[in-house]
Image (cartoon, rainbow, N blue to C red):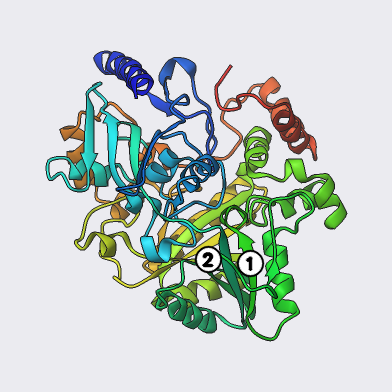
Amino acid sequence: MESHKEAVAHISARVQQFYDRKESFRIYHGSTLSTRDILYEQDKIVDTSKLSSVLKVDTATKTALVEPNVPMDDLVHCTTQYGLLPPVIMEFPNITVGGGFAGTAGESSSFKYGLFDCTINRIEVVLANGDIVEASVSDPDTSDLFYASAGSCGTLGVVTLLEVQLIESKPWVELTYIPIQSMPEAIAKLKEAAADPSVEYIDGILFARDCGVIMTGRLVDSYPADMHVRSFLRARDPWFYLHAGDVIKNSKGPVKEAIPLTDYLFRYDRGVFWGCAYAFKYFMTPFNRITRFALDPFMRTRVVNHAFHKSGLSKQILVQDLAFPYSTVERFIEYLDKRLGMYPLWLCPVRPTQYLQKQPRNTFAMGKDPLPNDMLLNIGVWGMGPSDHVKFVALNREIEQKVRELQGLKCLYAHAYYTEDEFWTIYDRKWYDDIRTKYHANTLPTVYDKVKANLSPTQPENESWGAWLHRKAWGIWPLSGVYGVVRAAIGGNYLLAK
């Protein structure tokens, strides 16, 4: 803990310097899972990238003290040595504890435990004036700071430590694949699974309007001798979504498999769900078992994310996670089918935050308007959008308007094309401004400042000839993609401006 205290003291001093100068800063973590264009200026950041240790695992209280830049795979590796596991583990191994708390994150256990921030008991925060405070669920004096910090993208202070809840771990997940032929059938299966107390994990994939799979998982110590065992983390293993599709093609009913725990938790890492299939199309490369095996080092989330940011292709890729009440989600699927015909879609039921808190609270995960106390269904919409920036923005705004029309919400890690006025009709600005004033955070960027995407055309006014030539050359296939892959292969920092 001494090295942690020294690091936090250094961060506190750095933050106070910005506060004294009334200057804004951004928190630099060393990596990001956001899809927005991000480039940090070295003299305008507070660097927390070294806060990357699990400081303590307490088997008596079933909690862990964790620094914010601990990635999910390190957290799982550490806690399972004690026979324990965080209740919610995000599907990509490089998502960090701090990122999951501040950026809103859920996974296939969120139907039971809520979003990741619902599994955090308390946080240590360096406020924007340099003060070091602890905020927790149980402390009436600081619970407002705790709840406001969840999903606020680091705009209330610098989180430097989190106490994570843990549950008992088991070495295997018994996964059941349930074929479905319609969205109403999918919803019925999701509700049935969520009512079963033995189920720990639920998610689904919709391959087409009339074809999909719901998957339910149970933590188990062992499995029957005749049960098939499947892994997903080795280069020779299948990508999970392709395997799930093959399972339902070759079966007429539910199929069970035993999967090693870590392979299940990070089953979508290879191929980044199905996002890497678009890379094969982009580079006009055959998409088969041999090419996936040969290119496996480039198909992992850490490398893909690096290439994604350096190539600039985020301006063309549609990335939206959108949550709806069950009463309206079918209408959204119908809209997507007619408007885009974009499949696969990810289905992930999520228990609303206010249901778990037993009382209504403002959060950036749930917005300011009351939501149903039953389940929400997250729809992951990921694929290539129009290459024309104006059309790309228009499509994203159209989807956002449809989400609002159907009483849904979107995760703010993704592309957000709201105007500022639209944004603050969804979230409670007075509550947020009052919290920022109370905790001296008015010099920091707001949540809207952090999440807004560029609404303007890519060609600026009074563009120089040199800039014009660079932009035109960058648009020639496949220069930007090749550059992104090369930079990812070289490695190193990709977020700090030179």
Q: Which amino acid does label 2 sit on?
A: Val
The part of the image, by quadrant, that contains residue 11 is: top left
The tag on residue 111 is none
**Side of 59 relative to 122 (left or right):** right
Q: Mark 1 — residue? A: 258
Q: Who is closer to the viewer here, 425 or 436?
A: 436
Residues tagged 1 and 2 counted as in contact (Cβ below 8 A): yes
Q: Mark 1 or 2 closer to N-term?
A: 2
Residue 22 picture location, percent across and down: 27, 18
| Circle 2 Cα neighbour tier, 10 Å, few/some/many (<14 / 14–19 / ≥20) | some
- Picture residue at 53% right of the left edge, 79% below the top: 186
The part of the image, by quadrant, that contains residue 305 is: top right
Residue 218 picture location, percent across and down: 51, 68
Quadrant where the N terminus lies?
top left
Mark 2, secondary structure of its residue: strand
Q: Mark 2 — residue? A: 220
